[in-house]
């Protein structure tokens, strides 16, 4: 079924994902003046004084409500309607009118279908990661759909408790796209601050350095897990991750350099040396580097010089390695291509050194012109 409720020619089971952009920046919608007048009139009737920004946001929410209403009016006449499960949710809350950082992450989820026997309201907390496991469980137990014994889900399934209760382990991405916060049971870690989560997501400050350290460790575990997924292009079941990854590996540092470089020198320096102090290594260090290069044709990629990395002290370099690139996306002619490099530094090469510098550059012997940007370095210690 498309947005107009028309029947699709695809006969087999499938999943469709629709994303609204009207409720995101710059909050522009068709007939904006009409919806803005509606919202202003309602606020005036309730004697509410709101900013123009809040009124603009509210007008886009009203527009989206009407779109969903019209969509269901049309789709309910479609023969697929009786055999479809609809899930409506948001990716994050509003930055306006949120009483705290936790509320900015809170969104409702609505599941509707003619297949449901009766309406229910559940107050148990869960996350988007819990949706897929629940749907596959439904298909497996009710319809005999075969699923693997071990799956890489990071969620457990939707919480169907009818009473308000927090029983989750859920890292939260901030608006800078880093996983900086953690909900663990009825506690909320916000940077170095710890809170108890009370009713209506009210936050009560707590002082417990030992527990803060524990939650930071759990947050680090999660970031390692997602880094493993992204940088190694591999999905592994959570249980395996806990057994093989968490016990011996942690993420030491992420360094991002967003400047654009256009150079043809023999040594193309991308950024300053990165200092490391008191690093404890049991097996070695893994470095994953990515950056974007502007390439006109595929043969340009084949001629790219290796990315060079070295570990150094004030006395000089004690480890030097080059890594060949691999394309981390579909190749596009005359466009920015993301390249990935991986370095492995065994412990034997460290020679018990705990303080050193990481240096990195492109050794451009042919003095070919390079146009690169958006370098990201991730360091993992084992």
Image (tube, helix red, strand yellow):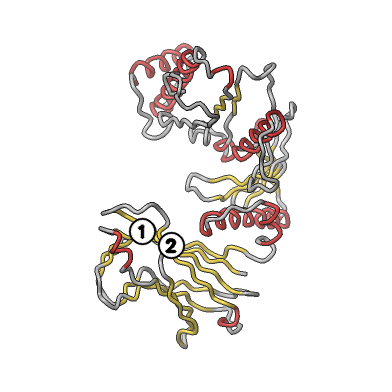
Up/down of 327 relative to 7, above or below: below
At numbered mark 1, what does the secondary structure look like: helix, strand or loop?
strand
The residue shown at (54%, 75%) is 345
**Picture residue at 69% right of the left edge, 20% below the top:** 120
> Which residue position holds label 2?
340
Q: Up-down: is 162 above or below 72?
A: below
- Structural distance between the alpha carbons of marks 1 and 2: 9 Å
Which residue matches tag 1?
292
- Marks 2 and 1: in contact by CB < 8 Å? no
Q: Residues within 10 Å of mark 1 (few under 14, many from 20)?
A: many
- Most extreme residue toward the bottom is 315
**Which of label 1 and label 2 is nearer to you?**
2
- Residue at screen point 51% across, 58% down: 231
Toward the viewer: 39 or 260? 260
- Residue 299 seen from this side: yes
Residue 319 against residue 241 in the figure, above or below: below
Which percent across, then down, holds residue 251?
A: 58, 63
In the image, taking residue 255 as reference, residue 33 lies left or right, namely left
Q: Quadrant of residue 25?
A: top left
Question: Which percent across, then down, holds residue 274?
Answer: 46, 71
For residue 114, above or below residue 323? above
């Amino acid at each position: 079924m498309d947005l107009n409720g028309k029947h699709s020619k695809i006969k087999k089971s499938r999943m469709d994902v629709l994303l609204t952009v009207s409720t995101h920046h710059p909050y522009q919608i068709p007939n904006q003046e009409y919806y803005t007048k509606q919202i202003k009139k309602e606020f005036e009737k309730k004697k509410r004084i709101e900013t123009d920004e809040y009124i603009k946001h509210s007008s886009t929410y009203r527009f989206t409500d009407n779109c969903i209403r019209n969509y269901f009016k049309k789709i309910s006449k479609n023969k697929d309607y009786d055999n479809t499960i609809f899930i409506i949710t948001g990716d994050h809350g509003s930055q306006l009118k949120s009483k705290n950082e936790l509320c900015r992450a809170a969104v409702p989820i609505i599941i509707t279908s003619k297949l449901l026997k009766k309406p229910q309201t559940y107050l148990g907390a869960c996350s988007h990661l819990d949706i897929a496991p629940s749907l596959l469980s439904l298909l497996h137990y009710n319809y005999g759909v075969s699923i693997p014994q071990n799956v890489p889900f990071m969620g457990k399934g939707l919480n169907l408790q009818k009473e308000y209760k927090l029983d989750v382990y859920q890292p939260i991405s901030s608006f800078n796209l880093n996983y900086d916060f953690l909900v663990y049971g009825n506690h909320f870690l916000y940077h170095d601050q710890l809170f108890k989560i009370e009713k209506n997501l009210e936050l009560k400050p707590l002082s417990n350095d030992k527990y803060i350290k524990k939650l930071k460790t759990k947050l680090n575990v999660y970031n390692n897990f997602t880094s493993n997924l992204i940088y190694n292009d591999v999905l592994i079941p959570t249980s395996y991750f806990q057994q093989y990854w968490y016990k011996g590996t942690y993420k030491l540092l992420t360094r991002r350099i967003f400047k654009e470089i256009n150079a043809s020198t023999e040594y193309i320096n991308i950024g300053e040396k990165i200092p490391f102090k008191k690093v404890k290594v049991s097996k070695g260090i893994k470095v994953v580097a990515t950056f974007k290069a502007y390439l006109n044709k595929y043969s340009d990629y084949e001629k790219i010089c290796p990315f060079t990395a070295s570990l150094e002290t004030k006395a000089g370099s004690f480890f030097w390695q080059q890594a060949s690139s691999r394309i981390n996306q579909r190749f596009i002619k005359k466009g920015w291509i993301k390249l990935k490099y991986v370095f492995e530094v065994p412990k034997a090469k460290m020679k018990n050194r705990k303080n050193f510098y990481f240096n990195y550059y492109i050794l451009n012997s042919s003095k070919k012109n390079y146009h690169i940007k958006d370098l990201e370095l991730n360091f993992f210690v084992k």
